[in-house]
Amino acid sequence: MQDFHSLFKRFMDLLIPLRCVKCGVIVENKEGLCASCWPLISFIAKPYCACCGLPFDFEIEDGALCGVCNHDRPPYTTARFVFSYTSESKDLILKFKHTDSIGSAPLFATWMARSLEAIQDPLCIPVPLHWTRLFMRTYNQAALLAREIAKLNGWTYVPSLLLRKRRTPSQGYLSKKERIKNVSGAFKVSETKKMQLSGKTILLVDDVFTTGATLNACSKTLLKAGAKEVHVLTLGRVVKAQQIL
């Protein structure tokens, strides 16, 4: 039976070859990027802030915080990311988010799972879309990622625990102050699932960390409703303000 599955997999690989998620060329590896595209993606690795995950430009001791977190600690315990959101990496997310490239979800989830530090049996929750936007887009990219991460680790996936109670304008071209105001009071915890949240560690999943306004608002809502702690995990992270496009 094992030999049959192996042969079937090889047949499917020939029938539907793996392709680079950035440029689309056929690749032999399962890492998702070809040799030409791999160096173009700025993967985030230590050293970085122990809380918000902001990369440091120099070596520093483990557990160090960036200036922003030292001054005003975010509501979440940690935030971790796969790569910096740059002109070279943003097309990976935009294709996934706007062109129905949902087949990339398992690969991206594998990348994201590697970026996680040890957390114990969290509930995996996506940043929610308002129902009207979900109806128009037909899928929530954050939910696809959260589901795959939960599957990889054997964790519980709860897609409808956190809800967006009002439709907020797109954050794309807003300043940090405008983003904070835009998402203030925009989220709530489902009354029917509130008991499931009590005392639990939460893994909050989204595609991009920009200013952190949305993830902060979600984290505050979850903690106020009884969560023990919240850890944030996204695919991309805007490291420099000029990268917000």
Image (cartoon, helix red, strand yellow):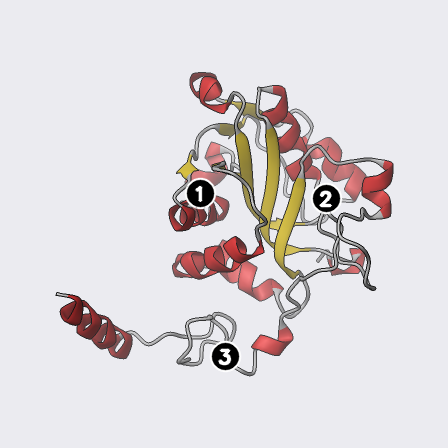
x, y (%) of residue 242? 79, 59
Rendered residue at 47%/16% (across/down): 191
| Lower sequence index among marks 1 and 2 | 2
Of residues 72 and 99, the one drawn nearer to the viewer in this rendering: 72
Which residue is rendered at x = 18% and y = 74% of the image? 7
Question: Number of callouts in the render?
Answer: 3
Residue, x 41% and y 36% (percent of image)?
A: 156
Q: Position of residue 28 (x, y in %)?
A: 39, 80
Mark pair 3, 2: CA separation: 32 Å
Residue labelled with disc 2: 51
Q: Secondary structure at mark 3?
A: loop
The disc at residue 136 is: 1
The answer to whether residue 100 shows anywhere in this view is no
Q: Nearer the viewer, mark 3 or mark 1?
A: 3
Left or right relative to 113: residue 63 = right
Q: Up-down: is 33 above or below 142?
A: below
Bin the neighbour count of mark 1 within 10 Å (Cα to Cα): few under 14, some 14-19, many 20 and up.
few
What's the CA distance linking mark 3 and mark 1? 33 Å
Q: Which residue is mark 3?
A: 34
Q: In the rendered structure, which amino acid carries the disc numbered 2?
A: Cys
**Image quadrant of residue 75?**
top right
| Relative to 16, residue 145 above or below | above
Earlier residue among tags 3 and 1: 3
Measured in 3D between alpha carbons, the distance from the residue under mark 1 to the one under mark 2, in whole angstroms, is: 35 Å
